[in-house]
Image (tube, rainbow, N blue to C red):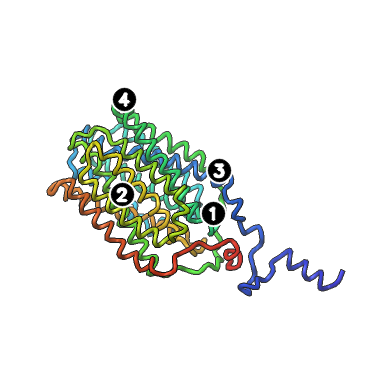
């Protein structure tokens, strides 16, 4: 065997220089083949997201419960919802480091156990007070941790060329529960009381914690050579996430009270229509986003999103399902596009930190519910939806410059290997 052949074999067994980058290419085991990314770990992550989605979605009916059981004013509803978002924002500075230290699977397990304990504690409450606010704050902490670890886990399990699709599927798993949980919880709460709704939420979180224990405990590599996205692009996307988060939580907090004021006793049809439409766009509509480009998809999605939020001001029994469909179509394309734009080219070691910031931005929008609750007390709930919808739609102007450039595209498999 010649010396040259032996030298070539050694390079094959270790690291061979990449002609595209003139830097050592990673070992083959470090590169996850795109065709094998959807495997057992990702399926378990989807199951975890479904459990989280069900447990959290049960509490989407909390505003209705507060209105019916305690005659809560819009301001009181806004306070209960807003304290949840405030906690999510306040923990951002240290949450990324905490998640990295604990590990993604352990964070998911502990956060779901905390949610389960809080949900069961809600069953013992008999009014709005300090205890309810504390429990909602703890649920905010749990949710921030679950969302941060969940998004970072998606980035770890899916290859760069499939990140947008993976984000959509992970979100779709939760979205399914946006329809199922209210559809199940609303009649259960009406017949047996909301104690059973809180119990179901806690049981789902406990089940999710069990599934999360089997997620891989991989540690992101600190030596990634991925280039950082521009600060301006990140700031624009984070701002859009905050504003759209405000729109989403205004709908979740005030739709039921507005519907009740107009004699609409059930809002389950809205949630079912919204979820089915969003799921369709995150699966069948994926090709549409690929052709249009992430930035252009985000511009169109945020404009339509704001339009339908404003239209909810005129909600009636006949328009409830139609408004849910439009809201869901926009939601289904908007959030995966924004998240894929944000995490494009992010090094693995930075994912948990950025996921915490993104979650904080979404929940910063939730804090506006506090102010919108006071606006509703003076101007009415319809005004809240109009104002929020206009603000959301206007974000299309901020995203438009990104759409005018070359569309943000996910790396192909060959580009990923060359860059790494």
For marks 3 and 4, the one nearer the N-term is 4
Instruction: Work out whether residue 192 or residue 125 is closer to the camera in this orientation and state it.
Output: 192
Q: Is residue 90 visible?
A: no
Cα gap from disc 2 to disc 3, whole angstroms: 32 Å
Cα gap from disc 2 to disc 1, whole angstroms: 27 Å
Instruction: Work out whether residue 91 or residue 230 is closer to the camera in this orientation and state it.
Output: 230
Q: Residue 248 carries which label?
A: 2
The residue lying furthest to the bottom in this view is 22
Q: What residue did someone put label 3 on?
A: 214
For marks 1 and 3, the one nearer the N-term is 1
For marks 4 and 1, the one nearer the N-term is 1
Closer mark to the observer between disc 3 and disc 4: 4
**Callouts 2 and 1 close, C-beta under 8 Å:** no
Cα gap from disc 3 to disc 4, whole angstroms: 35 Å
Tag 4's secondary structure?
helix
Q: What residue did someone put label 4 on?
A: 192
Closer mark to the observer between disc 1 and disc 3: 1
Tag 3's secondary structure?
loop
Q: Which mark is residue 272?
A: none
The residue lying furthest to the top in this view is 191
Q: What residue did someone put label 1 on?
A: 158
**Callouts 3 and 4 close, C-beta under 8 Å:** no
In the drawing, does residue 241 fall left or right of residue 30?
left
**Callouts 1 and 3 close, C-beta under 8 Å:** no
Say if 409 sits above or below 113 in the image. Answer: below
């Amino acid at each position: 065997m010649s010396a040259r052949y032996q030298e070539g074999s050694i390079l094959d067994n270790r690291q061979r220089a990449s002609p595209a980058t003139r830097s050592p290419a990673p070992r083959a085991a470090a590169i996850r083949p795109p065709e094998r990314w959807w495997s057992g770990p990702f399926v378990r992550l989807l199951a975890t997201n479904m459990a989280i989605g069900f447990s959290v979605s049960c509490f989407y009916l909390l505003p209705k419960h507060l209105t019916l059981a305690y005659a809560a004013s819009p301001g009181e509803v806004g306070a209960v919802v807003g304290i949840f978002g405030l906690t999510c924002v306040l923990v951002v500075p240290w949450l990324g480091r905490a998640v990295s230290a604990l590990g993604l699977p352990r964070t998911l397990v502990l956060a779901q156990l905390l949610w389960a304990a809080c949900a069961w504690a809600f069953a013992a409450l008999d009014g709005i007070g300090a205890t309810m606010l504390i429990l909602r704050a703890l649920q905010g902490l749990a949710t921030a941790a679950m969302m941060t670890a969940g998004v970072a886990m998606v980035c770890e399990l899916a290859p760069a060329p499939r990140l947008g699709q993976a984000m959509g599927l992970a979100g779709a798993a939760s979205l399914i529960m946006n329809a199922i949980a209210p559809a199940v919880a609303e009649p259960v709460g009406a017949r047996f009381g909301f104690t059973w709704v809180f119990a179901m939420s806690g049981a789902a979180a406990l089940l999710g914690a069990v599934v999360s224990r089997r997620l891989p405990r991989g540690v992101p590599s600190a030596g990634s050579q991925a280039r950082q996205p521009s600060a301006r692009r990140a700031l624009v996307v984070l701002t859009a996430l905050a504003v759209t988060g405000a729109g989403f939580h205004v709908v979740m907090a005030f739709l039921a009270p507005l519907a009740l004021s107009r004699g609409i006793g059930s809002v389950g049809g809205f949630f079912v229509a919204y979820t089915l439409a969003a799921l369709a766009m995150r699966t069948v509509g994926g090709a549409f986003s690929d052709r249009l480009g992430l930035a252009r998809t985000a511009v169109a999605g945020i404009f339509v999103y704001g339009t339908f939020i404003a239209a909810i001001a005129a909600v009636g029994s006949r328009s409830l399902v139609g408004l849910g469909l439009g809201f869901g179509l926009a939601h289904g394309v908007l959030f995966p596009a924004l998240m894929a734009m944000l995490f494009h080219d992010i090094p693995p070691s930075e994912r948990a930190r950025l996921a915490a910031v993104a979650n904080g931005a979404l929940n910063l929008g939730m804090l506006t519910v506090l102010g919108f609750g006071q606006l509703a007390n003076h101007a009415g709930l319809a005004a809240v939806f109009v104002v929020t919808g206009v603000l959301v739609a206007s974000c299309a102007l901020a995203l438009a410059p990104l759409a005018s450039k070359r569309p943000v595209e996910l790396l192909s498999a060959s580009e990923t290997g060359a860059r790494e």
